[in-house]
Structure formats: structure tokens, C-alpha cells
Amino acid sequence: MQQIFLTGATGSIGDSCLDLIRQYNTLFSLKAFTAHSNWQKALSVIRSFSPAYAVITDRESYFRLKQRYSGDKTVLLYGMDEAVKLLCNESFDCVLNAIVGGAGLDITWHTVKNQKRLCLANKESLVIGGELVYSLSSDCDIIPVDSEHSAIFQCLNGESEQNIRKIWLTASGGPFWKSRIDFELVTVEQALDHPRWSMGAKITIDSATMMNKGLEVIEAHHLFGTTYDNIFVAVHPESMIHSMVQFVDNHIIAQIGETDMKGPILYSFTWPDRIENRYSDFDLFELNRYNLHRPDLNRFRCLKLAYQAGKKGTEKCIILNAANEVAVSLFLEGKINFASIAGIVENMLEKDLNLGQLSIENIKTLHKEVYSKTWEYYEKKF
Ligand code: NAD
Ligand code: MG
């Protein structure tokens, strides 16, 4: 039985992971989980799975949950520091990091440091911490869960990274890749209406701006050691080809499958093995056309900004990521328009904000600083 630590259990990836644990209950068991503010959902996870530990990272929600939970099977803990302690002191076969945003950095960092298997959905932690994480060892036990990176990981099985000529990251393009809609007029509802995937709000907006693909370019750079000039994005609206690797001999291997995150999560738990998919089948003939298009970097400025930040290094990646997190939440709250997301990120990237020496503390400090500077910028300009 594999013991799983699921961080970000109340989100969309969390749901998929819990579904898998239910379906494969003789193989996987939920030993611990974290949740932030959705204490009601955390309570239902406790009731369904009776894990040994539940960590609530939002203070008020922790106290609310404590009032409502009267059982004794699950130990309730408060705060990210307790989650980190658990990571370090308890045994887990896999840690699935499904927290959204830079808040997932501590989990990524301490899982790798403790040499436990990190099943990584939280791409933002690699965007800001990838250089640091891989400075520990070039051979970290990180199994990507992001579908594109899981695809590349599968294409590379047994291949040397030196044999890679190009990585082709596919992108659905989100709801606006084809429409000529003016980005200033896009509503929150339109941006949240993703054509292929059902996901949390932040990543759905990132898909609409294509910042998601930009973050994934940086993620791929760290995971596979590929230079930015060799990472290409292809818009593939059907989202069936999850990504491709072109080798030095120009042979291309692609991974094709359903648009269901349970696939990559299950693979990250069972790798290097595979187990039978009990919940669905895949019909290759369901689609008779697989389209691929060049992305429009002038319209989707966030993707261009991510390439630029990636090439400049960790400092700019932290600014890109944190400014984007703030801008996306401002958009979701109806405070700025859709076009302003890229504008705010671009503006913050021009500011002189410094990381200093590469360390976990300095990354977290700069991340916070960019958050407050982006708020200041918003309050002045909007
Ligand atoms: P979500 O918004 O549905 O869930 C986010 C989870 O993070 C929740 O459990 C929430 O409690 C927790 N969280 C939020 N803020 C937190 C904080 N400050 N501290 C600690 N925990 C916090 O997000 P999601 O769609 O499940 O995505 C999770 C991660 O997986 C993201 O990094 C996303 O980019 C990545 N990802 C998601 C999908 C998908 O299909 N949803 C696909 C690929 C990658
Ligand atoms: Mg993805």
C-alpha cells in the first residue's frame, strides 16, 4: 500500500487524486493532506478517508474545522510549518503537490530535500524554485503531473536528455486563441469557460492568457534541462496530443491520451510501472483531425514575457509569477480588465527588484515583495 501526502486536497487536482485513491483503495491510501480555507471540504475529506493528519494552512479555517471535528482518527494541525514537519518526519511513498501558486514552494523544496518522491502539479514552485531545487541534485525524484510534462517524461523514458533536439509543448490555446475578441472586453465568465479542461480558477485564467504555457515552458526547462531556444509551443485545440519530443535524429515521439488529469497523477504514483486504467477507455478515432498551429506571441503577450523572463533567470521568473498571481486575482475580482494582466506583469518585470543570493528564504522574500509592489502599482494606476 502506498502512503500518499496530498497537498492542496480541496482543489481540482486534489479531487482527481482523491477519486483515484477511492478507486484503487487496495493500492493507495491517504495518509495526510493539506487544505487552505475550504474547511467544509477538508472535513468531508477527513470523514471519507480518515487520514492520520490534516493540515489547514489558513488560521481561521483551522479553528472552524477544529470546532466541527470531534473524531479522534485524524490529528488536526495548523500551518505550512506543520506540513513541512510532517514531510520531514513521517514516511510517505509519494507527495502530490497540488497547491496553487508560489505558496506551494515549501512543499516542493522540502520533499526534494528529504529525498521523497515529489509528484508535481504545482508548476509555480518550479518556475520560482527550479534552479534552487536542481542545485541540490540533478537527479531529483520529481515526477511531473502537469499533463504536458508527464507526456514529455513518458516520451523520454529511457532516452538521454542529450538526445533531445526540441521539446514541443502543446497548448489548447484556451477560449480565445482563434476569436478576435478585444482582450479589454473579455468578461470573467468568458475567460473561465475553458474549451477542453475543467480546472481551478487561477490556471483557467492562465490558460486564457497563455501564461499557463509560459509557466510550463519554464517548468520544462528545469525538469528536462532543455534550453529555451529548444522549447516550442504548438497550439493544439483538441488537447489529445499532450506533448512531443523531437530527438536529434528528427524522430518525434508524442504522447496521446484523454484530457483527464487522473492519467498523469496515476502514472506519477506508479512510475516506472503502469497499472490498468479502471475508469475509462480511449478511442483514437473519436477525433479525425489533430490540428497544430503556431502561437501568436503578439496577441498572447504573457507567453512572450515568460520566455523572456525564463531566459533572464530566476529573479525575473519570480517577478513574472508573483505579478501574474496578483493580476489574475484582481481580474477575477473584477478590478482590472483581461488585457491588463499582461500589462501589469510587463510593468513589474521592468522594476528593479533583486533576489540576492539564491536561497529558499530569498525566493520567498522576493515573492512577497513582488506581491506588495504589484498591489501598490494597481492602487496607483487603476
Ligand atoms: P485549485 O485552485 O482548484 O486548488 C488549489 C489548492 O491549493 C486548494 O486545495 C487550496 O486549498 C490550496 N491553496 C490555495 N492557496 C493556498 C495557500 N496560500 N497555501 C496553501 N494552500 C493553498 O487549483 P488546481 O486547478 O487544482 O491546481 C493546482 C496546481 O496544479 C496549480 O499549480 C496548477 O497550475 C496545477 N495544475 C492543475 C491542473 C488542473 O487540471 N487543475 C493541470 C495541470 C497543473
Ligand atoms: Mg499543463
Image (spheres, helix red, strand yellow):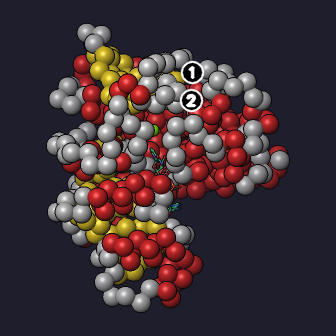
Classify residue 320 as left or right of residue 46: right
The reply to whether residue 257 is in sight is yes
| Image quadrant in which the N terminus is located | bottom left
Classify residue 141 as left or right of residue 120: left
Q: Residue at coordinates 28% horizontally, 69% vertically from top-left?
A: 31
Q: Mark 2 points at which residue?
A: 173
* Mark 2 burial class by Cα count in 10 Å: few <14, some 14-19, many 20+: many
The amino acid beneath tag 1 is Pro
Which residue is at the far top?
Answer: 249
Relative to 217, residue 115 above or below: below
Circle 2: element type: loop
Q: Residue at coordinates 19% horizontally, 59% vertically from top-left?
A: 27
Q: Distance between the residues labelled 2 and 1?
A: 8 Å
Q: Nearer the viewer, mark 2 or mark 1?
A: 2
> What count of labels does the image hold?
2
First in sequence: mark 2 or mark 1? 2
Figure quadrant of residue 72: bottom left
Give the image location of residue 321, x and y in percent.
56, 44
Figure quadrant of residue 203: top right
Classify residue 45 as left or right of residue 194: left
Relative to 135, residue 28 above or below: below
Q: Residue at coordinates 41% horizontally, 67% vertically from top-left?
A: 34
Q: Mark 1 points at which residue?
A: 295
Tags 2 and 1 in contact by the CB under 8 Å rule? yes
Give the image location of residue 372, x and y in percent.
67, 56
